[in-house]
Image (cartoon, rainbow, N blue to C red):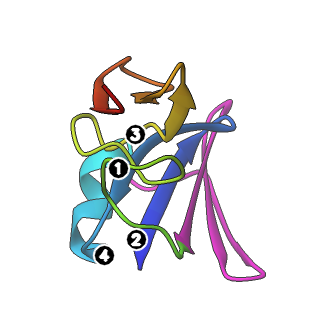
Amino acid sequence: MLRQITSNGKTIKYVKDKKETKKYLPDGAPDKFEFVDGTSIFTYGNDVYEVFDVDREIGNYAGNVCPICQAGEMSDFGGCATCNNCGAQLKCGL
């Protein structure tokens, strides 16, 4: 189980340990905090950060979280598992 952290709807990181979450949120107390359907929502000015658990794995296959940047998802592009965030090409069927 991983924890996904998004900022304004864009994934910024997947983390394994809840303690790592704070590293990817702005410093200081949020202007507003909500907990809705298992999602923690932090508001800092105009920026909204959401933190929630996802049933995903870090790995080389399509659908996995990218092991390089840990912010993107691996997709199958032309026979290679390619990260949609950093562009890393990992598992190629050559």
Q: Disc 1 or disc 3, which is closer to the eye?
A: 3
Q: What residue do we see at 53% from left, 19% from top? A: 78
Q: CA distance from mark 2 to mark 4?
A: 9 Å
Seen as rendered, the residue at the extreme front is: 94
- Please state which amino acid type lies under the numbered disc 1: Gly
In the drawing, does residue 32 fall left or right of residue 85? right
Q: What residue do we see at 44% from left, 68% from top? A: 3
Which circle's residue, 1 or 4, is located before the other in the chain?
4
In the drawing, does residue 28 fall left or right of residue 64? left
Q: Position of residue 52 (x, y in %)?
A: 57, 69
Which circle's residue, 1 or 2, is located before the other in the chain?
2
Q: What residue do we see at 36% from left, 20% from top? A: 86
Towards the viewer: 52 or 23: 52
The image's mark for residue 71 is: 3
Q: CA distance from mark 1 to mark 3?
A: 23 Å
Neighbor class of circle 3 (other Cα within 10 Å; few <14, some 14-19, many 20+) is many
